[in-house]
Image (cartoon, rainbow, N blue to C red):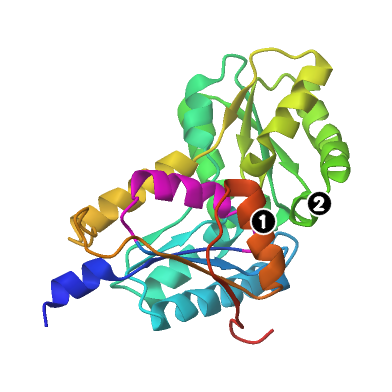
Amino acid sequence: MNTQAHAEDAPVGIFDSGLGGLSILRHVRAQLPHEHLFYVADTGFAPYGDKPEHVVAERSLAVARFLVERGAKAIVVACNTATISAVKLMRESFPAMPIVGVEPGLKPAAAITRSGKVGVLATERTLAGAKFLQLRDQITEATGAQFLLQPCRGLVDKIELGDPEGTLQLLHRYVTPLLDAGADTLVLGCTHYPLVQAAIEEVIASTGARDIALIDTGEAVARQLVRLLDAGLLLRPAQSDAPARLDAYTSASATALSAAFNGLIGIDPPVREATFGAA
Ligand code: DGL
């Protein structure tokens, strides 16, 4: 058997606590249209952002194990909270596996802010993570940029529920004070937030603020995945016989995840219900 060809043909595993990873998946599909993909929505355990770090870390490891057991050749941790809490542990646990994490885009934000003030919207867990705070301090020291941290308690739940009114209400509460404080750049530090970018823009417009930049690292994450697959000789060739497949798994309702795939990115992959470690 040609082992290299077998490895190239294996899927890339992408996971999040729920729908947020779809904001990464869409960039991965655009940049790597020939790759087979597994998407895991750990909706039954969501949100991750208000849980203790060790709980998120254990759960993320269980999801990673699920993907490894199903033959994933690489893993994208499409969740800032899981990355901050668990990516180091995951790399230690699966040293041969290319693992791409997603972190709030503080560096690109510091590079473009004109006011020197950057608002960071993320979960409580992300903003309290030692890895995040270290990054923030390094960038502040190097650039002088000031980061205004805004934990967005409850926002992931509203987005998961598909509740536009509730989402808008919370966005007003979280975004307006950052703009009032002089932020001209907002980091979307949770992969769920790009899914409601239109609502964020509506809130910004309602305050009268202009030229507010939004930073989403989804495209950069997909580029990093391309680099790692390329370096590991793991890219699936464009001329492969079978078309690229996408299979999705959820720890909650398959019907709900199917509807979300349809509504958010207009595709209809097979979705199965699954358990990841202890519930
Ligand atoms: N999409 C996850 C993130 O990027 C949301 C975490 C949660 O479930 O609270 O942080």
| Label 1 Cα neighbours within 10 Å, binned few <14 / some 14-19 / many ≥20 | some
Seen at 28% across and 65% down, the residue is 242
**Residue 151: image x %, image y %?**
75, 46
What residue is disc 1 on? 260
Task: Kindly indicate the quadrant of the structure image that contains residue 96.
Answer: bottom left
- Element at label 1: helix
Dot 2 or dot 1: first in sequence order is 2
Relative vertical location of residue 68 with respect to residue 221 in this rendering, above or below: below
Seen at 55% across and 53% down, the residue is 267
Relative vertical location of residue 46 with respect to residue 207 in this rendering, above or below: below
Amino acid of disc 1: Ala
The span picked out in magenta is 17-35
What residue is disc 2 on? 158
Image side of residue 139 versus residue 203, left or right: left
Farthest left residue in view:
2
Taking the image as four quarters, which one is ligand 1 found in?
A: bottom right
| Alpha carbon distance from label 2 to label 1 | 13 Å
Q: Is residue 24 magenta?
A: yes
Seen at 80% across and 56% down, the residue is 161
